[in-house]
Image: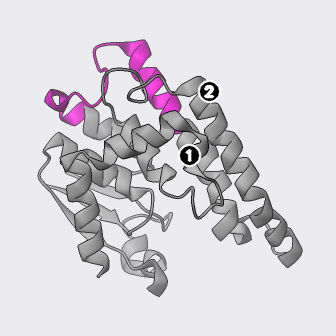
Amino acid sequence: MLTLYYAPNTCALASLISLEEAGARYETVRLNFADGEQRKPDYLAVNPKGRVPTLATERGILTETPAILAFIAQSYPAARLAPLEDVFAFAQVQAFNSYLCSTVHVAHAHRLRGSRWADDEAAIEAMKRKVPQSVGDCFDLIEREMFAGPWVTGNEYSVCDPYLFTIARWLEGDGVDIARFPKVHAHHRRMEARPAVQRALSQQQMAAA
């Protein structure tokens, strides 16, 4: 059985939704970031990066959201969570998810975790002030150039969709109005109506209670 290590309100929600969409048999281990559980020896023995998500599989540990989402899509092909039969289209899925991971998430992290990049308080505050612009610019690009609609890649739902949904949930906290992006906003509402998304959100909320 798969085991997903996660924390509420993190990017791990994308993996949780995808496991639900796939109909996978899995269990979860919730980490309490407020208590620093991600930095404790027991978890670092599982994932030395000290971050989430982590997916424990029969073959070993996987980290990084794009890799986990690709693994889920390929492990449960009947769920059709990626265009596995089309090499180029699958690479496009990977490109979109890599952009969310390496650029959009990093821009967001400058608001909460500026100490990763600087020790100077003034520099950290400057990074925080930049977040509405930098995250907004990322979503401008997604809205204008990267979102095919009605789902990220077009007519077919894929593992790009729970990942975009997860990061778009952070926009308000980042000082960005999602209504600026009509396609992304409509996608967000469409995602909220999916049963797998509702189950994942409910599970996350119950665990956080």
Distance (Cα) linking label 1 and label 2: 14 Å
Instruction: Check if residue 91 falls in the magenta segment.
Output: yes
* Badge 1 or badge 2: first in the primary sequence: 2
Q: Quadrant of residue 137?
A: top right
Please determine whether, in this image, residue 190 is positioned above or below residue 157: below
Q: Is residue 114 left or right of residue 72?
A: right
User: What is the crowding at mark 1: few (fewer than 14 residues within 10 Å), some, or many (at least 20)?
Assistant: few
Q: Which residue is mark 1?
A: 179
Quarter of the picture containing the C terminus is bottom left
Report the residue that reaches farthest toward the bottom.
35
x and y percent of residue 161 in the render? 38, 38
Residue 144 badge: 2
**Residues at badges 1 and 2 in contact (C-beta under 8 Å)?**
no
Q: Amino acid at mark 1?
A: Ala
Please determine whether, in this image, residue 54 is positioned above or below residue 123: above
Q: Nearer the viewer, residue 15 or 154?
A: 154
Q: Is residue 137 left or right of residue 121?
A: left
Q: Residue at x 57, y 37 (%)?
A: 99
Residue 71 badge: none
Q: Amino acid at mark 2?
A: Arg
x and y percent of residue 30 in the render? 30, 73
Q: Which residues are magenta?
A: 74-98
x and y percent of residue 165 in the render? 42, 47
